[in-house]
Image (tube, rainbow, N blue to C red):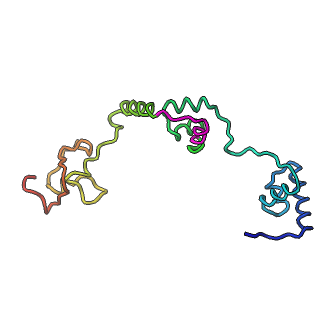
Amino acid sequence: MSGKRYTAEEKQEMLKTIREVYEGGGSVQKAGQAAGVAHQTARIWLKEAGVRLRETRGRNEIEYDPEDLRMLAEQGLSEEEIGKAMHVSKSTAGMWLKAQGIKINLEARKARKAIEKEELPEREKKPVKKCRTCIYRSASPIFGCNYIGVTGHSRLLICTVAGCTVYKRGKRISKKRMPADI
């Protein structure tokens, strides 16, 4: 891919501007903008002219304590949870773990998940959706039970999806195909 070609005089004038801005403390990007060229071009021209480029701190050079990282991994936290705890992204936490050679303790994670599951109040546990396998399920995926539509009888008011009192496993039936024993 070829870009714009500059004459030797144009390049020297632009390089002079780039050097002034860069050596005055500006970034390569600002120096390139001042001369009207891309920052990649400015960087190449500065290197060709023998200018020693300053080292930059990249975004991935965030300071972290390996002991904190090791402690969180030992507790069985996932990369995402470690990232949240250390205020970085999941991928950064994963890079740090890999760089330090730290493995996440999966046994501790399983134990922690089991304890969390036991501590949940009964109403916060996910209800078991029996409607998906019930013979009284609705033809529409939006609605759950169609017991009333099939049989013409209502269920108890306290009957919920999780504690269904009329659940029967099997192929969905419609009012037309309703067996005599229902």
Figure check: 153 above or below 87: below
Q: Nearer the viewer, residue 143 or 33?
A: 33
Figure check: 99 above or below 111: below
- 99 within the magenta span: yes
Percent across and percent down for residue 175 are 15, 60
Residue 39 quadrant: bottom right
Q: Nearer the viewer, residue 138 or 116?
A: 116
- If the image is split into quadrants, where does the N terminus sit? bottom right
Q: Main secondary structure of the magenta part?
A: helix
Percent across and percent down for residue 59 are 68, 45
- 67 within the magenta span: no
Judged left or right of residue 87, residue 4 is right
Q: Nearer the viewer, residue 171 or 159?
A: 171
Judged left or right of residue 145, residue 27 is right
Judged left or right of residue 105, residue 25 is right
Percent across and percent down for residue 166 are 17, 46
Q: What residue sits 28% from the left and 55% below the top?
A: 143
Q: What residue sits 38% from the left and 30% below the top?
A: 119
| Residue located farthest toward the left when viewing the structure as drawn | 180
Residue 43 quadrant: bottom right
Q: Nearer the viewer, residue 134 or 164?
A: 134
Q: What residue sits 68% from the left and 36% below the top?
A: 63
Write the start and end of the magenta stretch as one range.
93-105
Percent across and percent down for residue 27 are 81, 51
Residue 180 quadrant: bottom left
Figure check: 16 above or below 102: below
Judged left or right of residue 59, residue 72 is left
Task: Please tell me how many numbered marks the rendered image carries.
Answer: 0
